[in-house]
Image: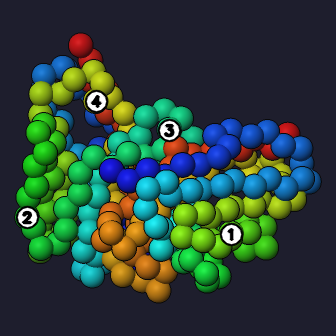
Amino acid sequence: GENVEQHPSTLSVQEGDSAVIKCTYSDSASNYFPWYKQELGKGPQLIIDIRSNVGEKKDQRIAVTLNKTAKHFSLHITETQPEDSAVYFCAASHPTLSGYALNFGKGTSLLVTP
Amino acid sequence: GAVVSQHPSWVICKSGTSVKIECRSLDFQATTMFWYRQFPKQSLMLMATSNEGSKATYEQGVEKDKFLINHASLTLSTLTVTSAHPEDSSFYICSAKGAHSGNTIYFGEGSWLTVV
């Protein structure tokens, strides 16, 4: 099955700095890579996603890059703000009998200090 | 984005009883719904996948007789934890996707279950 590795597990940056979270996946058939932000006690919120036919996608301060050859994808947050503090999960989705379920990384706890 | 609602957001039940959690897609038809379990400071673990009108597909190690999943309509799936034990205490999260969303999956707000 698919195995998603995520690094780092914790990340602390100063407000205004950039934050980068990296993930690798094992199944070359995976074709959809979303990123979720989870605040304490809440469900994950989709913040950005990328499909395998695209190498980069940007949405304001958030960008995701995908390297299919190396099977890794990264989340970039620029000009970080304290409200960006949360746990971020990467995921990979590939077709299965169950219908494109997501396999999650272990999460990165991001702390943005003022 | 699409809205997925879970109810209740938290529940406390006694050992041996059953508890039902509902997951609703409010503004789209969810052809597939997924149920996840999350322990504190850990990642989300997929429990099962359900397609409307079909039996759920359970992940390895998940007891289907204990975690009953029903996906009777395109907007509602339920998870029933039967004969609950304290070790079933966890954060249960549903997610859904529909034909309109491609692979995009939207999550509910989660339900905290505490079994005492």
User: Mark 3 or 2 closer to N-term?
Assistant: 3
Q: What residue type is labelled 1?
A: Ile
Question: Residue B40 location in percent, x, y?
Answer: 57, 41
Q: Which mark is residue A84?
A: 4
Mark 3 or mark 4: whose residue is earlier in sequence: 3
Q: What residue appears at the point 18 percent right and 27 percent down from the top-left corner?
A: A80
**Residue A80 vertical position relative to residue A54 in the rendered view, above or below:** above
Dot 3 lies on which element?
loop
Residue B107 visible at all:
no
Q: Residue at x 35, y 42 (%)?
A: A37
List the residue tagged with mark 1.
B69
Looking at numbered disc 4 in the image, what kind of residue is underneath it?
A: Asp
Q: How far apart are marks 3 and 4 (CA)?
A: 15 Å
Where does the image place residue B44, in percent across and percent down from the top left?
A: 50, 54
| Vertical placement of residue A27 versus B36, above or below | below
Residue shown at 61% from the left, 83% from the top = B54
Query: Subunit of mark 1?
Result: B
Along the line of sight, the residue nearer the viewer: A44 or B89 = A44
Q: Tell me how far mark 2 sits from mark 1, CA to CA.
A: 37 Å
Residue A61 image point, x, y percent: 13, 37
